[in-house]
Amino acid sequence: MKSFWSRIAIALLFITVTVSAKAEFGQWCVADSQIPDSVTQAALDWVCKHDEADCFKIQPNQPCFLPNTVKGHASVVFNSYYQRYKHMGADCYFSSAAILTQRDPSYGSCHFEYMK
């Protein structure tokens, strides 16, 4: 019986180590819910004006248009910019309108990209 429980313990340990080794923690850049919409909108306008992010996905009839809110649209665009430029030193600030999260904010057909 002792051998049986030893095998179970070893198997559980192996599974735990394997799962832990494969786990990755991504970071996505999203609009900070505590910042006024006017600040968020100004940052969103700047990013889209300079064509530095994928602003197409937040247009009507596109996958990330709904919810049609400043925070919803800004989250998609801020993350697009951040993922494109983080390897060149970009941060997730946007005049204090954004924050990093380790939870994938994707929903429905709206996929938030993540690049290693």
Image (spheres, rainbow, N blue to C red):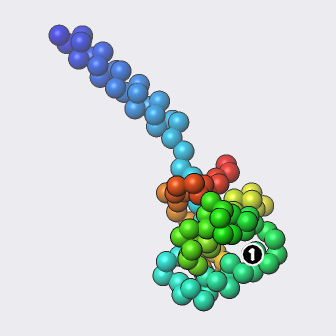
Q: In this view, does 64 lie to the left or right of 9?
A: right
The quadrant holding residue 79 is bottom right
Q: Mark 1 points at which residue?
A: 47
Residue 24 in the image: state x and y as whole percent: 54, 45
Front residue (pair 4, 65): 65
Q: How many marks?
A: 1
Front residue (pair 103, 76): 76
Q: Is residue 70 left or right of residue 50?
A: left
Residue at image coords 55%, 77%? 69
Indicate the amino acid at tag 1. Val
Residue 116 in the image: state x and y as whole percent: 67, 49
Q: Is residue 66 visible?
A: yes
Front residue (pair 45, 14): 45
Front residue (pair 59, 72): 59
Residue 114 in the image: state x and y as whole percent: 64, 53
- Position of residue 114 relative to residue 31, above or below, is above
Residue at image coords 68%, 78%? 44
Q: In this view, does 88 lie to the left or right of 93?
A: right
Residue 18 in the image: state x and y as whole percent: 47, 30
Residue at image coords 48%, 82%? 34
SS state under label 1: helix
The quadrant holding residue 64 is bottom right
Q: Is residue 7 left or right of residue 100?
A: left
Residue sitting at the far left: 1
